[in-house]
Image (cartoon, helix red, strand yellow):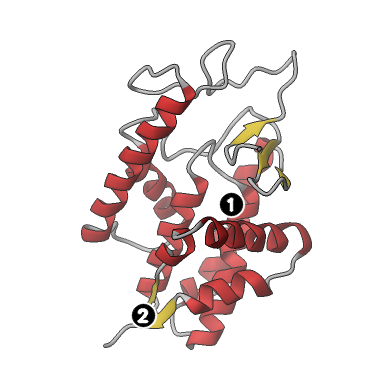
C-alpha cells in the first residue's frame, strides 16, 4: 500500500533538503528521526492547532499571506519552514491508499502559480456576495487550483481545508470538512474527487462533496 505522504521525485543527484541525510524523515524541532513517530507527533500538534484556530481565527483578507499564515499556525511548533512554499525539491509524487499515484509540478513554479491563483481570487472579491450554489462552484475551483499546486512541503491538505473554511466563513457560509474524514471511504472519496479535478478538470465530484457540507450562516 502506498503512503499518502507526498515525496519529491529524488535521484542520486537530488537530495530532499527538508529531510535528515539519508532518510525520508522531515527535519523537525523535536529531532525525531523515526517516520511513524514523527507522523503521530505531527498529527497531535496539527489537531491541537486546528482546534485553536476554530476558537481564535486568523484575521484579515483571505489572501496569499493568510494562506501562509494558516500553514504557519498549524505547523510552526514542529517545522522551521512552516508558512513557506516548498523549494528546491522538484516534482512531488503522492501515492493514495487506493493505489492511485498523483504527481505535482516542479517547486520552482509554485510561487508564480500561487500568485496567479490569489490574483484571480482577489478579482472575484474572495467570493463574497455569491449565492450558495455559485459559491460552492467557485470554492471548488479555487480549492482545486491550490491543491494541484501543492505549495508546501507537507501539510497542504489540512491547511487548505482550514483556509477554504475561512473563505466560506468570510462569505457568510460554513464549510464543514469533518464528515469527509469519518471513514476510509469518505476520505478516499475526497482524494479521488480532488485528483479528478486536478488531473482531468472534472470538478463535479469535488463540487458535490463541498456542496453537501456547505450551509448558510444566520445573519
Measured as percent of width and height from the top left, residue 213 is found at 45, 75
Residue 62 appearing in the image: yes
Q: Look at the numbered discs 1 and 2 and tell me whether their residues touch, using CB distance below 8 Å.
A: no
Give the number of callouts: 2
Specify the farthest residue to the left: 55
Which is more N-terminal, label 2 or label 1? 1
Q: Is residue 54 left or right of residue 163?
A: left
Measured as percent of width and height from the top left, residue 7 is found at 63, 32
Q: Quadrant of the N terminus?
A: top right
Residue 81 appearing in the image: no
The residue at 51%/38% (across/down) is 154
Q: Is residue 137 left or right of residue 32?
A: right
Please name which of the two marks, 1 or 2, marks the residue nearer to the observer. 2
Q: In this figure, which residue is indicated by the disc labeled 2?
A: 172
Q: Is residue 29 left or right of residue 9?
A: left
Tell me if mark 1 has few (under 14), some (14-19) or many (20+) residues whose alpha carbon lies within 10 angstroms of its own: some
The secondary element bearing badge 2 is classed as: loop
In depth, the one of 87 and 23 nearer the eye is 23
Quadrant hosting residue 185: bottom right
The residue at 71%/42% (across/down) is 105
Quadrant hosting residue 21: top right
Q: In this figure, which residue is indicated by the disc labeled 1?
A: 114
Amino acid at each position: 500500500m502506498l503512503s499518502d505522504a507526498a515525496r519529491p521525485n529524488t535521484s542520486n543527484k537530488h537530495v530532499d533538503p527538508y529531510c535528515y541525510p539519508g532518510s525520508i524523515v522531515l527535519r523537525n524541532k523535536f529531532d525525531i528521526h523515526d517516520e511513524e513517530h514523527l507522523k503521530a507527533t505531527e498529527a497531535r500538534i496539527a489537531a491541537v492547532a486546528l482546534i485553536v484556530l476554530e476558537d481564535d481565527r486568523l484575521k484579515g483578507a483571505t489572501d496569499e499571506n493568510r494562506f501562509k499564515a494558516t500553514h504557519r499556525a498549524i505547523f510552526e511548533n514542529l517545522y522551521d519552514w512552516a508558512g513557506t512554499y516548498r523549494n528546491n525539491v522538484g516534482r512531488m509524487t503522492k501515492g493514495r491508499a487506493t493505489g492511485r499515484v498523483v504527481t505535482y509540478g516542479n517547486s520552482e513554479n509554485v510561487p508564480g502559480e500561487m500568485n496567479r491563483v490569489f490574483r484571480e481570487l482577489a478579482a472575484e472579491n474572495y467570493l463574497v456576495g455569491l449565492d450558495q450554489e455559485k459559491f460552492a462552484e467557485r470554492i471548488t475551483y479555487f480549492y482545486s487550483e491550490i491543491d494541484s499546486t501543492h505549495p508546501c512541503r507537507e501539510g497542504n491538505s489540512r491547511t487548505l481545508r482550514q483556509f477554504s473554511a475561512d473563505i466560506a466563513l468570510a462569505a457568510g457560509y460554513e464549510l464543514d470538512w469533518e464528515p469527509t474524514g469519518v471513514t476510509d471511504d469518505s476520505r478516499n472519496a475526497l482524494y479521488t474527487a480532488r485528483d479528478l479535478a486536478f488531473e482531468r478538470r472534472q470538478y463535479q465530484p469535488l463540487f458535490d462533496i463541498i456542496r453537501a457540507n456547505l450551509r448558510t450562516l444566520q445573519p
